[in-house]
Image (cartoon, rainbow, N blue to C red):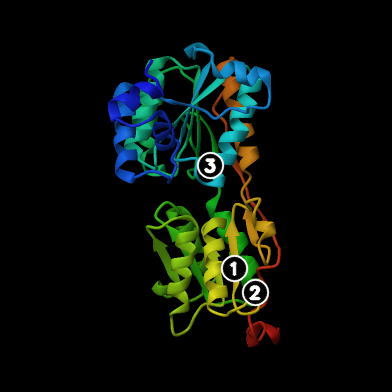
C-alpha cells in the first residue's frame, strides 16, 4: 500500500505538504495540491480518517496495518467545513467503538472522484462504504455499481426514496423554510441569499421557498460566488450593499459565509439586526460567540454521523437483512441576536390583520 512518503517522493515535496493537500487544506498552492491528489489517485492511496489522540488505544491503532475485513471506506466532499467535519467525526467515533477502522477519501465535490473512490474501496474489500454526496444527479451511476456487489453501502444525500441501499436524507428545503419563515414572521420581505458554488441545493431551496411565499426575488438578491467561507460572505454582502435598495435581511448558505457578511455590514456603518438581519445554517460553535450572536438553522450533523454508523454496522454484521432503510432528518432553528423586525416594523398589511 502506498504511503504519504511515497507520494511526497513522486511529487517532489515533503510529507507535510502531501498531508495538507489530501486533507483539503488551503495553506498550499492549488496547482501543487491538484498534482498531489492526482498522484495519490494513481497509486491508490486513501487517507486514514482523523483519529482521537486522547487515548492509548487510539494511538496504538494509528500504527496498525489496515486490514480490509475491518475497514470502512468513507467518501466525503471535504473536511474543511464544519458541517462535513462534524458528520465525519461522529461517524468515525461510533464506528471505531464497534471495532472498525475508518479510511477516508476526499473528492472536492467531484462526481468522477466519488465513483472512482467507490470502485477502489470495492477492489480493496472493505467491510462497508459510507458516501456523503451533494451530487444527487448521478445516483443511477452509483446504483449500477453498488447493485452488483454485496458490500454494504450507506448513502447520505439530498435525494429521497433511495431504494438500492440504506440512506439518510438531508432536508435542505426544510432548512430554507425554517430560516425564511422566521424572517418573514419578523416582517422582512426584501430577503437576499449569499452562497457559493457548492451550495446550489440550499440556494435552490431558498428560491423555491421565496416563490411559495409569493415574495419578489430580484436576480441581484441571489449572490453565488466562486469564493468560499468568510470571503464569500464579505464580497457577497458588499455587492448587496451597493444596490440602490439593499435587502433588510440576508440568508447565508452556512455560518462562515454569515461571518464575512457581518463584517461587511459593520464596515458600512450599519447595525445588526437594527439595519440588516442575518441568518446562517449549521450553528457552528463560534456562532453564539459572534457579536451579535448568529441566528442559525441547526443541521443534525451528530445524529447523521452516528445513525449512519449504526445502520452500516448492522448491515455489515448481518443484523439487517430486510429492505433498505431510508431516513430523513430535519433541521431546527436557534434564534439568537442577529435577527429582528426590519426598521419600521412589519409591513402595513400585516399590522392591520
235 left or right of 29 in image: right
Q: Residues within 10 Å of mark 1 (few under 14, many from 20)?
A: many
**Crowdedness near tag 3: few (<14), some (14–19) or many (≥20) residues, C-alpha within 10 Å:** some
Q: Residues within 10 Å of mark 2 (few under 14, many from 20)?
A: many
Q: Position of residue 329 (x, y in %)?
A: 62, 44
Q: Say which quarter of the image contains residue 30.
A: top left
> Along the horizontal axis of the image, is 154 left or right of 144?
right
Q: Earlier in the sequence, mark 1 or mark 3?
A: 3
State which tag comes first along the sequence, 3 or 2.
Answer: 3
The residue under the point 45% across, 36% down is 23
Residue 256 visible in this rendered orientation of the protein: yes
Q: Kindly identify which residue carries mark 2.
A: 273
The residue under the point 63% across, 27% down is 53
Residue 142 position within the rendered picture, expressed as x and y whole percent measured from the top left: 38, 31
Contact (CB < 8 A) between labels 2 and 1?
A: yes
Tell me the element at label 3. Answer: helix
Residue occupying the point 50% across, 42% down: 160
Q: Which mark is residue 84?
A: 3
Q: Looking at the image, which is closer to me, 54 or 281? A: 54
- Whether 223 is drawn above or below 114: the answer is below
| Whether residue 263 is situated above or below residue 152 in the rendered picture | below
**Which residue position holds label 1?**
278
Amino acid at each position: 500500500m502506498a504511503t504519504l512518503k511515497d507520494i511526497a517522493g513522486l511529487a517532489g515535496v515533503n510529507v507535510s505538504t502531501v498531508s495538507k493537500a489530501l486533507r483539503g487544506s488551503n495553506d498550499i498552492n492549488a496547482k501543487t495540491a491538484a498534482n498531489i491528489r492526482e498522484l495519490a489517485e494513481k497509486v491508490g492511496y486513501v487517507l486514514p480518517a482523523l483519529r482521537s489522540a486522547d487515548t492509548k488505544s487510539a494511538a496504538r491503532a494509528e500504527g496498525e496495518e489496515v486490514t480490509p475485513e475491518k475497514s470502512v471506506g468513507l467518501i466525503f466532499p471535504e473536511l474543511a467545513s464544519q458541517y462535513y467535519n462534524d458528520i465525519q467525526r461522529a461517524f468515525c467515533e461510533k464506528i471505531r467503538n464497534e471495532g472498525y477502522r475508518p479510511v477516508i477519501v476526499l473528492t472536492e465535490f467531484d462526481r468522477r472522484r466519488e465513483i472512482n473512490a467507490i470502485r477502489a474501496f470495492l477492489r480493496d474489500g472493505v467491510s462497508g462504504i459510507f458516501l456523503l454526496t451533494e451530487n444527487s444527479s448521478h445516483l443511477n451511476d452509483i446504483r449500477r455499481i453498488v447493485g452488483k456487489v454485496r458490500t454494504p453501502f450507506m448513502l447520505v444525500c439530498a435525494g429521497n426514496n433511495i431504494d438500492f441501499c440504506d440512506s439518510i436524507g438531508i432536508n435542505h428545503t426544510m432548512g430554507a423554510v425554517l430560516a425564511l419563515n422566521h424572517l418573514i414572521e419578523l416582517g422582512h420581505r426584501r430577503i437576499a441569499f449569499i452562497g457559493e458554488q457548492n451550495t446550489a441545493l440550499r440556494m435552490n431551496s431558498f428560491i423555491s421557498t421565496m416563490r411559495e411565499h409569493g415574495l419578489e426575488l430580484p436576480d441581484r438578491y441571489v449572490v453565488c460566488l466562486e469564493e468560499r467561507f468568510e470571503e464569500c460572505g464579505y464580497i457577497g454582502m458588499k455587492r448587496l450593499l451597493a444596490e440602490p435598495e439593499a435587502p433588510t435581511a440576508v440568508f447565508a448558505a452556512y455560518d462562515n459565509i454569515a461571518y464575512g457578511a457581518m463584517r461587511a455590514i459593520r464596515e458600512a456603518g450599519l447595525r445588526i439586526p437594527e439595519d440588516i438581519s442575518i441568518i446562517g445554517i449549521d450553528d457552528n460553535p463560534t456562532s453564539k460567540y459572534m457579536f451579535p450572536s448568529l441566528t442559525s438553522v441547526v443541521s443534525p450533523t451528530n445524529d447523521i454521523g452516528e445513525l449512519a454508523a449504526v445502520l452500516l454496522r448492522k448491515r455489515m454484521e448481518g443484523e439487517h437483512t430486510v429492505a433498505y432503510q431510508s431516513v430523513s432528518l430535519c433541521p431546527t432553528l436557534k434564534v439568537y441576536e442577529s435577527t429582528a423586525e426590519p426598521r419600521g416594523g412589519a409591513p402595513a398589511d400585516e399590522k392591520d390583520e
